[in-house]
Image (spheres, coloured by chain):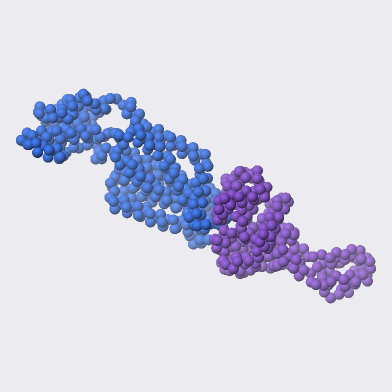
Chain colours: A purple, B blue
């Protein structure tokens, strides 16, 4: 279990982390969400020992994050970084060995990941000669090449084309299935919704939403969109457990409390007239995110 | 993975990357060849020099003599020097003038009853003059003893003594004085040049890691101090390797081409010079590693290195000045001060006469200073290495070991 425990960190007057607490289990793929400047990068840097928190700590399997744990961690920094003049394969072997891998294993693993990520024809090129997308692939390979048991990736999807996004998604899912604890930050909420079982949403350095995506969606209540031929008078007679969210012409949106059935609402609506259209929707992750963070954050927070 | 393995791995990368640079490899090879060719020059000069300089049987040796040279002494001198020609002079000063005058072709000066004068060696391969002066002096002394009615036993006794003072004009030093001056000059110039080269190399290496942000990946896997240690060790290996590559071929040429005339002790002197190179590298590369961690852009490298450059420059100038006065008080003091010690002690060992205490003390002090500089640099490095962007103030880096 990767545990962020009451992390606190300030940069001068700016509070980046204000008691952040959450955890990621082995085999779990956790999306780490939050507006710019919410403290995601700082928290992840604490997890890999690149930043020391002012208070609190990050623990892995019940112990502190020491150099041994860090050697078994794969990290993709927010600002991508590789030796520009070093060749792809050589660089990956070097990074794998720095993480404690034996020379032969490092060589084999670098070759495997280069193939897997479609870089075979660039294996001998200096990194600076690669396109940005390919550099990003090498960066992912650098995080994976030493076969880590913990993956901490800061915005791994930013700047990727759709094909590379698919490759990245596949790799992360596969690693999680192999028992690796994966935490990655992203602003692409729809992508996270489709990919992650679990999310942690942070705002102003604190955790504002955390849990299984499905559970969060269930807790948020479902939306029922109904169009009835004959007006909206029926909404005055909504059964308990249903709440009117929006009215537009004869379109009605009702929020069903968790666990409530849509049947009673439909029964009431049918008394008004013929049902023209019915949709039952889970709340989108983006809606949960906006609700948790508050729209103000999205607009007013300075970039990190 | 052990600490040693990590440091070796990092050092190995530094070495490999450097050896991959064609500019570095070829400039080293070209310089090395150039030095080897330069080392051939004395041999070539010998080959083209006029036969006058050679002492061969049958040549007449011209002596400037103060006083009346009687037949007995003339025979004695002829016995040891071969045919001689006597040029009477009024006094010792005149004899010295003649010896100093190259056109006069006078080999030795003899002040009867007092001393024999010989010119100081003019090249690495001098020394013949001193030997002939000693022989002349012994012969004259032998005659003195025999005239005084000495027996065979007395003669033996006399031969075991230094009968007359032999003075080499123009130098106090033994025959390898010139070689030692050459070593001191080349040593100081190249120590400074190579130190500056490697100082900028280590700073550029740090800037590459900070600028490309790869440092975050490295710090995640490796303790910061090991990262710095590996870097310094890797560049130090390259530095010593390059130094050897530059000068070993030249030294080999000297030995092979001029074996019989290599001054004694030159090997030891070169070994000592290498020691000062190694200590100098260690001190200055550690200093520069600490300073270099404060900046992220190449254009800031020179400015941040200024303190180290100034120290090395001071060492360079004092070292150069010390070639003229290797045992002056100021040179002795500068030999004790760690930043200037590599330059000054290199010179003092070559052309001066440092005491054992000065030598060992200076090395100990420098080693201590290297340790202290290493610890301080590691602390600054830890504080500065992850702060990419604007130049980090030394005080801030010192206080916050980690951002």
Q: Do we see residue B87 in this rendering?
A: no
Q: Is residue A258 above or below residue A51?
A: below
Q: Residue furthest bottom?
A: A240
Give the residue drawn at x 18%, y 29%: B81
* Residue A64 image-quadrant placement: bottom right
Q: Nearer the viewer, residue B347 or B9?
A: B9
Q: Nearer the viewer, residue A197 or A35?
A: A197
Q: Position of residue A190 (x, y in %)?
A: 75, 59
Q: Is residue B243 above or below residue A66?
A: above
Give the residue drawn at x 35%, y 46%: B272
Q: Position of residue B219 (x, y in %)?
A: 55, 57
Q: Residue furthest top?
A: B58
Q: Position of residue A41 (x, y in %)?
A: 62, 60
Left or right placement of residue A137 versus residue B185 in this view: right
Give the residue drawn at x 31%, y 46%: B348
Q: Quadrant of the C terminus of chain B?
A: bottom right
Left or right placement of residue A102 versus residue B98 in this view: right
Give the residue drawn at x 55%, y 63%: A66
* Residue B139 image-quadrant placement: top left
Q: Nearer the viewer, residue B11 or B359?
A: B11
Q: Do we see residue B379 in this rendering?
A: yes
The number of numbered badges drawn on the structure is 0
Left or right placement of residue A79 versus residue B260 in this view: right
Q: Residue furthest left?
A: B149
* Residue A43 image-quadrant placement: bottom right
Q: Position of residue B363 (x, y in %)?
A: 35, 52
């Amino acid at each position: 279990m990767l545990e962020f425990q009451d992390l606190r960190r300030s940069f001068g007057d700016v509070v980046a982390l204000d008691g952040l607490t959450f955890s990621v289990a082995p085999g779990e793929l956790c999306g780490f969400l939050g507006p710019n400047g919410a403290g995601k990068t700082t928290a992840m840097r604490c997890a890999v020992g690149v930043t020391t928190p002012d208070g609190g700590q990050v623990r892995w399997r019940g112990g502190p994050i020491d150099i041994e744990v860090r050697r078994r961690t794969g990290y993709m920094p927010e600002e991508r970084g590789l030796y520009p003049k070093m060749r792809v394969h050589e660089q990956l072997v070097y990074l794998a060995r720095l993480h404690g891998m034996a020379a032969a294993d490092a060589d084999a693993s670098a070759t495997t990941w280069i193939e897997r990520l479609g870089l075979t024809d660039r294996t001998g090129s200096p990194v600076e000669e690669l396109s940005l997308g390919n550099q990003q692939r090498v960066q992912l390979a650098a995080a994976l090449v030493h076969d880590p048991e913990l993956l901490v990736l800061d915005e791994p999807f930013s700047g990727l084309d759709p094909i590379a996004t698919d490759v990245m998604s596949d790799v992360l899912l596969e690693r999680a299935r192999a028992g690796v604890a994966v935490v990655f930050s992203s602003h692409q909420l729809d992508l996270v919704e489709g990919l992650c079982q679990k999310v942690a949403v942070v705002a102003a350095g604190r955790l504002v939403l955390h849990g299984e995506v499905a559970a969060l969606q269930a807790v948020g209540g479902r939306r029922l969109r109904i169009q009835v031929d004959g007006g909206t008078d029926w909404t005055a007679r909504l059964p308990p457990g249903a709440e009117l969210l929006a009215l537009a012409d004869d379109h009605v949106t009702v929020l069903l409390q968790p666990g409530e059935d849509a049947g009673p609402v439909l029964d009431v609506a049918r008394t008004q007239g013929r049902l023209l259209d019915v949709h039952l929707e889970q709340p989108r992750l983006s809606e949960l995110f906006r609700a948790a963070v508050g729209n103000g954050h999205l607009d007013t927070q300075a970039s990190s | 993975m052990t600490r040693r393995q990590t440091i070796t791995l990092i050092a190995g990368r530094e070495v490999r990357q450097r050896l991959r640079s064609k500019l570095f490899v070829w400039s080293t090879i070209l310089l090395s060849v150039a030095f080897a060719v330069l080392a051939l020059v004395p041999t070539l000069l010998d080959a083209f020099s006029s036969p006058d300089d050679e002492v061969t049987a049958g040549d007449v040796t011209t002596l400037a003599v103060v006083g009346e040279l009687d037949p007995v002494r003339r025979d004695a001198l002829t016995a040891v020097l071969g045919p001689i020609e006597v040029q009477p002079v009024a006094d010792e000063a005149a004899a010295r003038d003649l010896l100093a005058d190259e056109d006069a072709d006078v080999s030795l000066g003899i002040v009867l009853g007092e001393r024999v004068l010989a010119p100081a060696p003019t090249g690495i391969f001098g020394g013949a003059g001193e030997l002939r002066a000693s022989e002349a002096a012994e012969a004259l002394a032998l005659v003195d003893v025999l005239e005084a009615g000495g027996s065979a036993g007395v003669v033996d006794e006399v031969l075991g003594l230094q009968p007359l003072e032999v003075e080499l004009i123009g130098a106090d030093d033994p025959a390898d004085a010139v070689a030692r001056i050459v070593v001191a000059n080349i040593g100081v110039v190249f120590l400074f040049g190579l130190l500056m080269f490697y100082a900028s190399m280590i700073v550029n290496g740090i800037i590459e890691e900070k600028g490309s942000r790869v440092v975050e990946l490295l710090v995640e896997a490796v303790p910061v101090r090991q990262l710095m240690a590996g870097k310094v060790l890797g560049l130090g290996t390259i530095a010593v390797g390059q130094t050897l590559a530059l000068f070993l071929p030249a030294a080999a040429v000297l030995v092979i081409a001029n074996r019989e005339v290599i001054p004694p002790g030159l090997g030891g002197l070169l070994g000592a010079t290498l020691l000062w190179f190694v200590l100098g590298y260690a001190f200055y590369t550690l200093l520069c590693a600490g300073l270099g961690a404060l900046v992220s852009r190449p254009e800031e490298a020179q400015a941040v290195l200024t303190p180290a450059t100034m120290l090395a420059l001071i060492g360079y100038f004092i070292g150069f000045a010390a070639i003229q006065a290797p045992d002056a008080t100021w040179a002795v003091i500068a030999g004790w001060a760690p930043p200037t010690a590599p330059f000054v002690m290199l010179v003092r060992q070559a052309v001066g006469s440092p005491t054992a205490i000065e030598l060992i003390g200076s090395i100990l002090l420098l080693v201590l200073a290297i340790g202290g500089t290493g610890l301080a640099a590691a602390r600054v490095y830890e504080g500065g290495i992850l702060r990419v962007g604007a130049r980090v103030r030394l005080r801030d880096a010192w206080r916050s070991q980690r951002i």
